[in-house]
Image (cartoon, coloured by chain):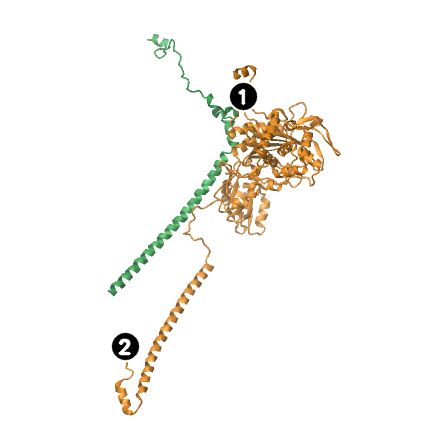
Chain colours: A orange, B green
Amino acid sequence: MTRTPLRPLARILSARDAGENPDHIERENIRARHEVVREKSRRRAEGRLLFLGLAFLASFGLIGARMGLLAASEPMEPRSAAPGAAILAQRADITDRNGRVLATNLVTHALYAQPKDMVDPARVARELAAIFPDLKEDDLKRRLTDGRSFLWIKKKLSPEQMQKVHEIGDPGLLFGPREMRLYPNGKLAAHILGGASFGAEGVNSAEVIGTAGIEKLLDARLRDPAQTAEPLALSIDLTLQATVTEVLDAGMKMMNAKGAAAILMDVRTGEVLSLVSLPDFDPNDRPNPLVKGDPADSPLFNRAVQGVYELGSTFKIFAAAQAMELGLVNPDTLVDANAPMVWGKHRIKEFQGKNYGPKLSVSDVIAKSSNVGTAHIALMIGGLRQQAFLKSLGFFEPSPLEMVEARSSKPLIPAKWPDIVTITASYGHGMSASPMHLASAYATIANGGVAVTPTLLRRSSLPDGTRLLSERVAADAVAMLRGVVDHGTASYARIPGYPVAGKTGTADKPKRTGGYYKDKVVNTFASMFPASDPRYVLVVTLDEPVDTSGTEPRRTAGYTAVPVAAEVIRRTAPLMGLRPEIELAQPNEVTAVSQNN
Amino acid sequence: MRALVYLLTFASVIGLGFWAYTENYATQQALKDVARLNAEIADLREALSIQRAEWAYLNRPDRLRELATINFDRLRLLPLEPEQFGVASQVVYPMPTVVMPDLQMPVDVSGIEPLDEVQSP
């Protein structure tokens, strides 16, 4: 660019000649130069504005287009984010403690119809009725032709049935994939597992929800998408469960009982290794609950946790153990056992009106199951302390076991606690609890006095429990219970190889109208083995048993529950790897002399 | 010089465009493979879960007990009993040597022919 001088000599000279002011020329030139500069910067600013405008237009256009695209298009998973492990099951499996499957899922199909697309509803109804005997042809025809556009026909189909429905070949019959819950072991552990059914149902899937047992209580855990790949391991051992069920079933029939329950528990961890209630049901085809009558008559009723009974003499050991813990007595202290005992207007009697008195040692009170002796021990303890002890053993609250039935079965506790309740509660009358409560309380005695929380889940570490009894008292209590088996009411529990300690309990069944039945009892045997160092607690309860092998019917636990429990222990102890203890024969005089020399 | 820079730039743009084209198709192919593999994995998992369920069903304790009963004459399986536990001292050690009794008057039966065949010619 050629720079024009501000004062060009030629024009100045000519201007001077003309008598004009040459400064005008200079100013004129300065103005023109400014004009040029302004024009240049204006263009640059315009260019920048245009660029900025275009940039904004482009970015807003991009965002707008993206938003429009997102709003208009179908949502889709980004395909490049391939899942590492595609999880098929929407509900976690349940296994026993060794990983054997108790509940799993199976893919199946549901059948539904869209009558609008149906070619020949009458033929479809006829053929479907031929495939599914439980469907009525007329009923089906009516539902297919009454103008509705959708209906469910079957919730689960077997592959064979599905093929047959395919062969009908009607376009109005459609299949929706389903996951169904399968319990491969059938009736085994039915009460623990409970059952499952479909919740909200759609064409493409349906949610499976637990209806009872652990399936219902841990429904959230089982359906948690983060944990469905990991099976829920129970504390149950399938082999033990099968054995206990077999023996208990045989025992129940032999003793003519209406129902039976057994709980096998590890005393240190509180893990329930086996929990059986008979009669049982098939969780794959769960029966409907009874609408009238006694719920205990239904096979759905779980006697082990819902059966809240007066547990009878099995409670006596708690009074004895507490009295020893408080230092009131020791196993050899003589207590008053003169029957009948009169307290106010009540008479406390012994079984069949016997009298073990006038004095009995605490060990013998337990071995002979003396009501009067226990009553005197309980009065020494006093109502308040007795109540607190039973409460700490868990008898006042529903059992914390992981089943809905357990959480909803509250023990029956008298509202007031006068002395007469102190007396009756000490031998297990006037307050009711489930066999599960009894098992965990016995586990406390068996493990050296530490409270246990019963659980159905496999535990990997020992839980912390509060100490309720000193180890010495617990050992003394176990020795007393050993005495019951050795020379007391539970002599049928003498099993070669496995020393058992335990206590029998017989309680009359209460009538629903009040009062007690004369010939209906609940027999319980709460035991622990091996007695030298108890590791397992077994509680066997028989509902309305009667032993008819003798000349007259016998209904005490010693003749009914004890032999059944003994057989359970004889069969299960080897399965748990317990070596039988070899009991040396008492040395007779000759060998005693030879050994001494 | 400038022309060379332009040429190189264009060449690299064309090269990158070709590379992006092939990469795009390779990615789509890989995604298809992943989808197919995922479907296959899902199928296999389904098959696995069915087989696991069948395994559990076929090994249910009731059935095993029945089978043990049915095949008792071959298997001789009985429930585990306390008597089956032993102590180490019950095992014989060292193994006693089995003494074969002396064979008196061995009877050789290989060279004897039936009588009538000897007499017949």
Percent position of residue B39, x then y: 43, 46
Nearer to the camera, A240 or A461: A461
Q: Which residue is drawn at the image coordinates 52% and 51% (left, top)?
A: A117
Residue A154 visible within the image: no
Above or below, comparing residue A554 to residue A310 in the picture: above
Nearer to the camera, A332 or A47: A332
**Which residue is outermost to the top?**
B119
Mark 1 or 2: in front is 1
- Asked which quadrant contains residue A420, the reply is top right
Nearer to the camera, A525 or A125: A525
- Which quadrant of the figure contains the N terminus of chain A? bottom left
- What residue is shown with label 2? A1
Left or right position of A50 against A293: left
- What residue is shown with label 1? A584
Q: Distance between the residues labelled 1 and 2?
A: 127 Å
Above or below, comparing residue A36 to residue A265 in the picture: below
Q: Which residue is drawn at the image coordinates 43% and 48% (left, top)?
A: A83
Percent position of residue B103, x then y: 38, 11
Percent position of residue B112, x then y: 35, 10
Q: What subunit carries mark 1? A: A
The amino acid marked with disc number 2 is Met
**Which residue is outermost to the front?**
A327
The amino acid marked with disc number 1 is Leu
Q: Give whichever of discs 1 and 2 has the lower sequence position.
A: 2
At label 2, counting other C-alpha atoms closer than 10 Å, the crowd grade (few under 14, some 14-19, many 20 or more) is few
Q: What subunit carries mark 2? A: A
- Asked which quadrant contains residue A19, the reply is bottom left
**Which residue is outermost to the right?**
A345
